[in-house]
Amino acid sequence: MQKVHYAAFAIFATSLAACREYCNIVGMSRSANSRALAPRRHEEILRRLAAEGSVSIAELSAHFDVSRETIRRDMKLLADRGQLDVVHGGATLFEPIEPALVHRSEENATAKAAIGLKAAELVKDGMVVFLDSGTTTLAVAHALDGLRDLTVCTTGLAIALHMCRQPRARVHMLGGEIDPAEEAAVGLDALEAIGRFRVDIAFLGGGGLSPDGEVTDFTRNGAEQRSRMIAMAGKAYFVLDSSKFGRLTPLRIPGFHQAAGVIVDAPPAPTISEALERKGPRVIVATR
């Protein structure tokens, strides 16, 4: 009887050791796979955030078949990079605040001037032009000084003031509520005013050029106005200095892909340029 017990115990011990070894191997494999798949999870988390505005830890854990702690670590890493905000039970889009126009006016001035000059090469005497509000579009306005008989439509106070001092320019200040930080007209009245014009060419700002090659914005007002300008222009160009490359801002600009190009002061990373041009707009680099 004792021999039977000893034999049964030996079989049990051997099986237990085998189970432990299997579990260790599986655990190590899952851990390695989790590390290897982390970049893909991060991309998918950011894609879902862009589409839905928020994600939950529970849903992501089930979707990826990983622990909730793994998803929490993913979210912490992305939050540390400034790509999302962690909230109770999940995450939401990171909502950066753009500095006021007065604080941006001296930033990257040389780059913005180069972009302005490149943009001005696309404008001919007698054209009707949309100039979006912002410091880079203000640089475009300064570069237009030598042209004749322009009609300039703008939401930017500084741009309207500069252009109305040019002897051969007609200026339309597109009305609406004034955003004191942006020094620009915003809201429904501004949208309606934009929609009353058909223009030859438009120059638009933006909040950032995302890693997947899309120009995005900080505010709904900005995104809607830029979208409307694209729709009302024969050709539209975004003007962005290189400080905005890779920057994620929360709002997409509807119809962004219909823009003819993005004028920049330096080439973006190849992955960004390729992604951008696959969507439609071409990259135009200004030389300083």
Image (tube, rainbow, N blue to C red):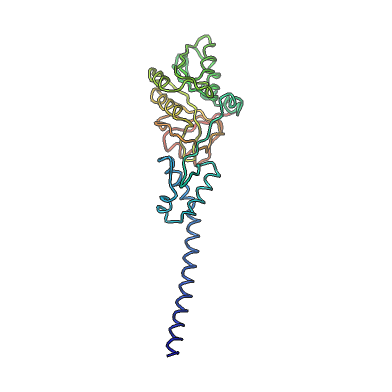
Q: From the top left corner, tell me how far across and down residue 285 is, in percent.
A: 53, 31
Q: From the top left corner, tell me how far across and down residue 25 is, in percent.
A: 48, 67
Side of 280 where 80 appears, left or right: right
Q: Quick check: 200 above or below 38?
A: above
Disc tally is: 0
27, 140: nearer the viewer: 27
Q: Quick check: 217 above or below 146?
A: below
For the C terminus, which image quadrant? top right
Q: From the top left corner, tell me how far across and down residue 128 is, in percent.
A: 44, 16
Q: Quick check: 197 above or below 278?
A: above
Residue shown at the point (47%, 26%) measured from the top left:
204
Q: From the top left corner, tell me how far across and down residue 239 is, in percent.
A: 51, 28
159, 68: nearer the viewer: 68
274, 224: nearer the viewer: 224
Residue shown at the point (44%, 86%) measured from the top left:
5
For the N terminus, which image quadrant? bottom left
Residue shown at the point (53%, 48%) measured from the top left:
76
Q: Quick check: 64 above or below 141?
A: below
